[in-house]
Amino acid sequence: MKKYLGLALTLAVVVAAVGAPWLAATDPMTTDFASGLKPPGSPGHPLGTDQLGRDLLARVLYGARLALFIGVCTVVVTAIVGGLLGLVAGFVERWPSAAIMRLADVQLSFPFILLALTINAIVGLGLRNIILSLSAAGWVVYARVVRGEVLSVKQRDYVHAAAALGVGRPRLLFRHVLPNVAPSIIVVASLQFSQFVVAEAAISFLGFGVQPPTPAWGSMLSESRDFLYVAWWLGAFPGAALALTALGVNLLGDWLRDTLDPKLRV
Amino acid sequence: MRGWIASRLLQTVLVIFLSLTAVFGMVRLSGDPVLLFMPMDIQAKDVNEYRERLGFNDPLLVQYARFMRGAVRGDFGESLRYRRDALGLVLERLPATLLLAGTAMLLTLALAVPLGVATAVRRDGAVDHAGTVLMVLGQATPGFWLGLMLIYLFAVQLRWLPTGGMGGLAHLVMPAVVLAAFYAARVARLTRSAVLEALGEDYVLTARAKGLAERHVVGKHALRNSAIPIVTLAGLEAGQLLGGAVVTETIFAWPGLGRLTVQALLNRDFPVVMAAVSFTSIVYTLMNLVVDLLYAWLDPRVRLRS
């Protein structure tokens, strides 16, 4: 059940993102002041239009594109950076381990959203900087989980055996330890994904991150606040898209954890 | 035990020290920090004068020492916008945040623990399925969207509740519900799995075997042994809430710490940002310490192992 619903929702978002140019009847940026704030079900605009007459369906579909792009980029960056730091912290003890783990402690003393928001306000707006800010705030979970896994994997017999056969440390790390830690990295990535997508929307909602007129769900929700009294659909649909995306990916992540690594607590 | 507490305290002091260092480093990410610390309406020719006056021409180490010396005394400089002590502005917002965080936390526990226990006891029954759906939905629904939709329904359409601001009890309802919806979903999931785990233990079997009523088995034996993870998570969530819920406070115009931080970021009022972020981090770190001490007190295995 979890598996199928999660897969179906995730697939739907991917289809929306990839197929946005074909699924949307009009361009998400084309304004048409004559037909502004049309309710859902208007001819040619199944989800209605916004205050500038832009087609809401097109904007929600293109929003999926942006959300997935930011989510995937951030997950990849954090998985590589956090994963490598976790590998090093678990494998090379002494000071590198201590230094990385103290750094993780420090980062965990800031709430995730506050840290990402502040970094974003400092480094500046735009797509590249939002990915940078989310990554800078989000690598810690990987580092912690991977380090814990490495500490246990490196005590296994096959690692000792490989070391006894004279396998060098880099090869030992990447050929023998990393493949056995990979399932946890995948599970953490799937569970982190929706957190990143929602955080991006929250940051754009607060006026940082991705700026209008780019169709991002967060900034669409932010704009919708001014029209809450007259046009409920402006907030309802982008938010629902965001919630369904988070739901689908969360379910998929839960299922992956149950199958790959039931003991893992994130 | 005493040694363990001492080492834990020392570690906390170290983390706070490093966190303040991180705040100092963070405002240097942009390259030129002077742009963050001068009033918006300044002329280009005056930038260098500001740089000199704010001490950004000094060696980095001197600047760092100056920041840390100020931070230890609670001096983060003056707000660029309000021309007042930055930390003072932060502390002024604390009561509002405390009220919201406290209410949200109470609501979270009141919703989550009964729901978690009910779903665990009736495992795979209708209650479990319905409860699990609620938890999954609560976790996936973004708070700011839920907030907007609640405002539309209860403030715009039905006119039962005010759209935002702080005032009577009615103002507190929606922001507290929005925060609790998310946190309660997490606590309920954890309660469910912890109670399920406890129900599989031998002491539960023993309690049942000696004929104890089921409500005593669940309430006295299973729930008490599940308390540790629940207390841990609830404590960490309380720590997060005390830093101010940035998004929820903004939507509901709640005059707390979170909204102050967002406004300071939007106004590029960085002394206030640094004061707020440092304060939040310290509160969160101390909350972690409290949770750890509580943990050791509840479970002797923790302190004996380390």
Image (spheres, rainbow, N blue to C red):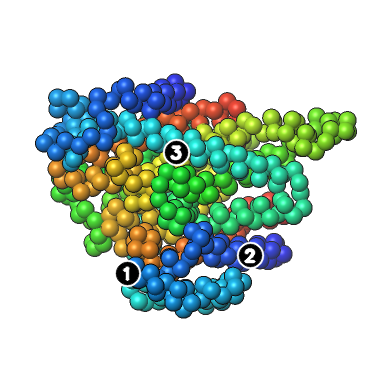
Q: Exactly how many numbered labels are in the figure? A: 3
The local secondary structure at tag 2 comes to: helix
Residue at point 22% right, 32% down? A55
The reply to whether residue B86 is visible in this rendering is no
Mark carried by residue B14: 2
Mark carried by residue B41: 1
Tag 1, which chain? B
Give the left or right position of residue A86, taking residue B280 as reference: right
Give the amino acid at mark 3.
Answer: Ile
Q: Nearer the viewer, mark 1 or mark 3?
A: 1
The local secondary structure at tag 1 comes to: loop
Residue at point 50% right, 47% down? A132
Give the left or right position of residue B74, taking residue B94 as reference: right
Q: Nearer the viewer, mark 2 or mark 1?
A: 1
Depth check, front residue: A75 or B57:
B57
Q: Determine the image quadrant of residue B87.
A: bottom left
Q: CA distance from mark 1 to mark 3?
A: 34 Å
Report x, y in % for residue A9: 39, 25
Depth check, front residue: A179 or B212:
A179
Depth check, front residue: B175 or A122:
A122
Give the left or right position of residue B257, taking residue B279 as reference: left
Report x, y in % for residue A46: 20, 26
Crowd around label 1: few <14 · some 14–19 · many ≥20 (10 Å): few
Report x, y in % for residue B86: 41, 72
Mark carried by residue B19: none
Report x, y in % for residue B274: 46, 66
Mark carried by residue A70: 3
Residues tagged 3 and 2 counted as in contact (Cβ below 8 A)? no
Residues tagged 2 and 1 counted as in contact (Cβ below 8 A)? no
Q: Nearer the viewer, mark 3 or mark 2?
A: 3
Residue at point 85% right, 30% down? A161
Tag 2, which chain? B
